Image (tube, rainbow, N blue to C red):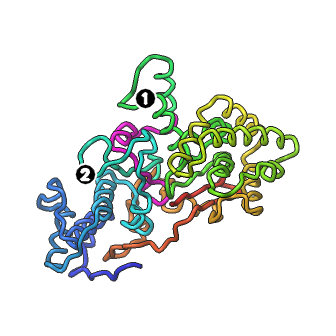
C-alpha cells in the first residue's frame, strides 16, 4: 500500500538541482510527520528547511504519527543526501526497514539495543560501500560494528583480521579478529568477486534478512548449509550430492556429513539463533573449510550457477526461493556510479511530489537471483 501524496503548493524552482529537490522532499516529509530536521539543516537557504517550511504550510497539525522505522528512514535519507549517495525510495521504505530488523548484531553477536546511545544500539548501513541505499544492500548491525566498518571493504576487513591474528594488534577499532572476519564475509556477499576469491571464504555469518549474495559459489555454499537448518526436514545429503559431477559426489558427501555432525553436536534445540550459531561456528573449523575448498575449487562459477538451479528444480533449496534476472539482483544499487546519486535530470526518474511509501508491497521470502552473465544472487528475508 502506498498512501496518496499531497500536492506541492507551487512548482520547485527550475534552477534547482536533483540534490536540491531531494533535500526539499526530505524536509517536506519531516513536516508531514511533525518532525524537526536536524539543526544543521535549518539555516536560511537550506533546501531541507525550505521543504520543511513548505510542508508545515500544507499539513499544519494534520500530521501522521512517526514510527521508529520512519524516523530511521528519514535519517538514512538525510545522511545519503549529505554524502551524495543514491537512495532507492521505491524499495527502501519504513516497512522495509522493519523487515530487516534483527535481535543480534551479525558482526559481534551481541544483543542490539535501541535509543540508549551506546555501542550496541541498532544501526543500519550499506554493506557494499560502492553501492547505494537499496534493497539487498542494507543490513542492521551495532553502532560499534558500523563505526568500525566505516568505508572498509571486504579486503580491508580480511587484512585487519590477519593483522590481529599475527599478533600485531589485539583489536582494531574495537573489533577482534573473529569479528573482522565476520565483517569480511558479510561485505563479500554484496561484492562481485572472482570465483576463486569467493570460494576461499568460510560462511562465518549467515546473510541477514533481505541481504543479497552476488557470488554463485557463495550461493551454493549457503544452500548446502541451510539444508541443516530446516526444522523437521532431513538434510538429504545423498540427494544433494547426486546433483554434483561424479568426481565431486564423495567430497560433497564428506563435507555435508561433517556439517551434519556439527549440527547434531549442537543438540536437539530448534532455536533459530542457536542453530545459526552452530552452523556459523562449524565454518570456522579449518577441516570444514578445507573440504569446502576442495569442492568449490573444482567448480567454475558457471557450474555453481547450474548446481544452484538444479537444487532449486529438485526442491532441495529453501522453500520460497525465487529466481531473479541478474539486473534485478542489483536494481537501484547505482553500481555504475559507485553508489553516488544522479546529478542530472535525465538520470533522475522521480517526480514531485514524493509520497511516503508505507509498504513496498513485497512478500517476505527467501529469494534467489541467478543469471549466466552476472552470476547469482540470493536475497534473504525473515
Residue 139 is covered by the magenta coloring = yes
Q: Position of residue 252 (x, y in %)?
A: 78, 42
Q: Residues within 10 Å of mark 2 (few under 14, many from 20)?
A: few
Q: Quadrant of residue 87?
A: bottom left
Q: Residues within 10 Å of mark 1 (few under 14, many from 20)?
A: some
Query: Residue 167 or 284: which is nearer the viewer?
Result: 284
According to the picture, the residue beneath numbered tag 1 turns out to be 176
270 horizontally vs 106: left or right: right
Q: Which mark is residue 280?
A: none
User: In this orientation, which residue lies closer to the viewer: 318 or 191?
Assistant: 318
Question: Mark 2 vs mark 1: which is more N-terminal?
Answer: 2
Question: What residue span does the magenta drawing correspond to?
Answer: 132-156
* Residue shown at 35% from the left, 80% from the top: 3
The quadrant in which residue 316 appears is bottom right
Q: Which mark is residue 115?
A: 2
Tell me the quarter of the image containing the N terminus: bottom left
* Residue at image point 18% right, 56% down: 38
Label 2 element class: loop
Amino acid at each position: 500500500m502506498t498512501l496518496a501524496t499531497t500536492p506541492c503548493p507551487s512548482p520547485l524552482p527550475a534552477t534547482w538541482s536533483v540534490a536540491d529537490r531531494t533535500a526539499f522532499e526530505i524536509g517536506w516529509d519531516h513536516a508531514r510527520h511533525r518532525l524537526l530536521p536536524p539543526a544543521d539543516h535549518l539555516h536560511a537557504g537550506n533546501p531541507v528547511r525550505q521543504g520543511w517550511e513548505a510542508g508545515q504550510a500544507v499539513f499544519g497539525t494534520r500530521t501522521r504519527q512517526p514510527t521508529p522505522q520512519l524516523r530511521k528512514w528519514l535519517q538514512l535519507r538525510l545522511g545519503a543526501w549529505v554524502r551524495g549517495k543514491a537512495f532507492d525510495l521505491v524499495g527502501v521504505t519504513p516497512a522495509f526497514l522493519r523487515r530487516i530488523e534483527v535481535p543480534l548484531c551479525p558482526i559481534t553477536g551481541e544483543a542490539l539495543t535501541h535509543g540508549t546511545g551506546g555501542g550496541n544500539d541498532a544501526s543500519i548501513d550499506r554493506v557494499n560501500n560502492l553501492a547505494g541505499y537499496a534493497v539487498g544492500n542494507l543490513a542492521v548491525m551495532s553502532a560499534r560494528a558500523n563505526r568500525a566498518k566505516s568505508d572498509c571493504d571486504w579486503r580491508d576487513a580480511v587484512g585487519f583480521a590477519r593483522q590481529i591474528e599475527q599478533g600485531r594488534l589485539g583489536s582494531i577499532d574495537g573489533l577482534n579478529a573473529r569479528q573482522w572476519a565476520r565483517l569480511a564475509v558479510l561485505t563479500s556477499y554484496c561484492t562481485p568477486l572472482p570465483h576463486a576469491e569467493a570460494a576461499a571464504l568460510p560462511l562465518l555469518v549467515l546473510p541477514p534478512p533481505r541481504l543479497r549474495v552476488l557470488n554463485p559459489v557463495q550461493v551454493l555454499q549457503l544452500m548446502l548449509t541451510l539444508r541443516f537448518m530446516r526444522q523437521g526436514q532431513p538434510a538429504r545429503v545423498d540427494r544433494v550430492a547426486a546433483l554434483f559431477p561424479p568426481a565431486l559426489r564423495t567430497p560433497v558427501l564428506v563435507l555435508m556429513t561433517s556439517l551434519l555432525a556439527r549440527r547434531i553436536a549442537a543438540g536437539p534445540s530448534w532455536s533459530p539463533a542457536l542453530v545459526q550459531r552452530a552452523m556459523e561456528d562449524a565454518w570456522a573449523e579449518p577441516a570444514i573449510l578445507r573440504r569446502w575448498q576442495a569442492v568449490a575449487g573444482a567448480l567454475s562459477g558457471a557450474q555453481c550457477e547450474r548446481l544452484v538451479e538444479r537444487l532449486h528444480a529438485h526442491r532441495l533449496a529453501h522453500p520460497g526461493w525465487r529466481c531473479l534476472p541478474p539486473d534485478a539482483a542489483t536494481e537501484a544499487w547505482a553500481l555504475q556510479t559507485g553508489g553516488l546519486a544522479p546529478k542530472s535530470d535525465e538520470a533522475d526518474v522521480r517526480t514531485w511530489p514524493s509520497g511516503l511509501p508505507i509498504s513496498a508491497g513485497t512478500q517476505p521470502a527467501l529469494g534467489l537471483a541467478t543469471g549466466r552473465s552476472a552470476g547469482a544472487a540470493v536475497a534473504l528475508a525473515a
